[in-house]
Amino acid sequence: MPNKGVMLVVGGSRGIGAAVVRAAAAQGYCIALTYLSRSDTAEALVDELKTSGGTARAFPVDTQDEASILWLFKAVARMGPLTAMVYSSGITGPASPLADVSADTLREVIAVNLTGAMLCARESVRRMSSAQGHGGGAIVFISSRAADRGSAGEYVWYAASKGGVNSFALGLAREVAREGVRVNCVSPGPVATDMLSPERQAQGAAAVAIGRVAEPEEIASAVLYLCSDAASYVTGANLAVAGGA
């Protein structure tokens, strides 16, 4: 199996991130994944990949903390050249109208979903860009169709954070396109992860043209495509994997 370098999946211990990790390991990437608090889940995934012949490490990282992110990228550099970074870390906070949301929720959601994405992208560019003496790479952000729909009455701040990710990705793609770094987004609709309760998944399925929620592996397939040579002319794109939502 060819060695495709290191893929870092921020928020890679469960859900969409874990599906990306499994798919990437199967394609020959050396895997670095992060988690916030569930070390047992992360280490179980690492053990699974190693049992299958892969190379993987898990790192505890708080994406609200720049020092934690800087430590992460220094540690990952010891694994080999970084060729792909997938930012899958994201939170919503409790559902409510905007009138009832706390300032702490607003700060945390923006810090994790947007500022953390920007900081991880900055550190990735520093380690991928040909202008920095590196061999290029791919950055993919897990965004959301919520950015286009607004999530009124539930998570308008979450939708806004993902809208910021979309705008940031487009600008960064144009900024580093001639430095060998491609930057894209994948925007899922409802996905069968623990981020959505069974009731929310049922509501999402009813609202989607295909009539069901996505499996995490279906989102991962789009991510791996955008990281691959098959997408060598794709940058600044936002791929909706949303079943017609």
Image: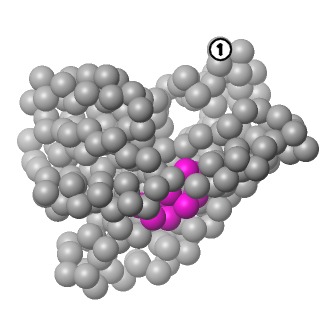
- Which segment is the magenta one? 112-120
The correct choice, above or below, for 8 with respect to 155 in the image is below
Quick check: can you spot residue 36? yes
Which residue corresponds to the image point at 26% horizontal and 22% vertical from the top-left?
44
Is residue 195 inside the magenta stretch?
A: no
Which residue corresponds to the image point at 13% horizontal and 35% vertical from the top-left?
54
Quick check: can you spot residue 231? no
Q: What is the quadrant of the C terminus in the image?
A: top right
x%, y% of residue 97? 87, 39
Q: Give the side of residue 121 with respect to residue 151, left or right.
A: left
Q: Nearer the viewer, residue 23 or 12?
A: 12
x%, y% of residue 231? 37, 59
Q: Give the side of residue 80 with respect to residue 158, left or right.
A: left
The colour scheme of the drawn protein is one colour
Mark 1: amino acid: Pro
| Residue 92 falls in image quadrant | top right
Is residue 115 inside the magenta stretch?
A: yes
Q: Give the side of residue 215 with respect to residue 244, left or right.
A: left
The correct choice, above or below, for 244 with respect to 213 in the image is below
Which residue corresponds to the image point at 49% horizontal and 78% vertical from the top-left?
174
Q: Give the side of residue 65 with respect to residue 113, left or right.
A: left
The correct choice, above or below, for 38 with respect to 107 in the image is above
x%, y% of residue 7? 27, 50
**Residue identifier under label 1:** 198
Magenta-drawn stretch, dominant element (helix, strand or loop) = helix
